[in-house]
Image (tube, rainbow, N blue to C red):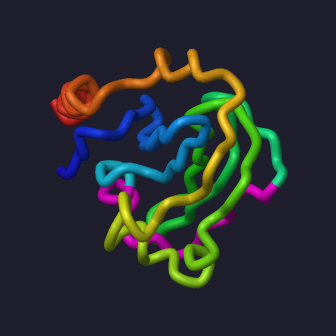
Amino acid sequence: MNVPQQLFYTKEHEWVKIDGKTATFGITDYAQSSLGDITFVELPKVGQDVAQFKFCATVESVKAASDVFAPLTGTITKVNPDLPAHPEFINQSPYEKAWFAVIEIADPAQKNNLMTAAVYSEYVKGLSA
């Protein structure tokens, strides 16, 4: 399982890359592997306000539909234009090609509610035990 060290993670298996006042996010390698072949993705809209750990997007796979939750509170400033036409990118490249959206962060202190790569790796190990 791929867990890039420079990212932060949620208990719902979203990853987030924080860069100053913006944050790019998607779903983790563990999440895409658990879901199986992704067949559809519905992204948030540019200008939409999102709240930390609240619903903001949907992914559907051959196994199930799953909600995706915002890792931080803020406003969506950009969405991945390629992802709706190519949901398979989530399976192929969850951390590079398959980013969902960019959030303008409203409260930088919320970073403290996220897990580091080491903590997330241990969390996932506990799920499969």
Q: Quadrant of the C terminus?
A: top left
Image x and y of residue 25, in percent: 51, 49
The residue shown at (30%, 49%) is 30
Can you say whether 78 is above or below 67 in the image?
A: below
Image x and y of residue 54, in percent: 68, 33
The residue shown at (36%, 58%) is 95
Question: Residue lying furthest bottom in this view?
Answer: 85
Q: Give, as a single range, the part of the protein colored magenta.
A: 32-46
Does residue 8 appear to the left or right of 122 in the view shown? right
Q: Nearer the viewer, residue 40 or 45?
A: 45
Can you say whether 3 is above or below 112 in the image?
A: below
Q: Nearer the viewer, residue 14 or 16?
A: 16
The residue shown at (60%, 48%) is 67
Image x and y of residue 35, in percent: 40, 58
Does residue 97 appear to the left or right of 125 in the view shown? right
Image x and y of residue 65, in percent: 57, 58
Q: Nearer the viewer, residue 36 or 43?
A: 43
Residue 42 shown in magenta: yes
Residue 126 shown in magenta: no
Can you say whether 2 is above or below 129 in the image?
A: below
The residue shown at (44%, 24%) is 114
How many numbered circles are shown?
Answer: 0
Q: Nearer the viewer, residue 124 or 73?
A: 73
Does residue 74 appear to the left or right of 11 in the view shown? right
Does residue 96 appear to the left or right of 2 in the view shown? right
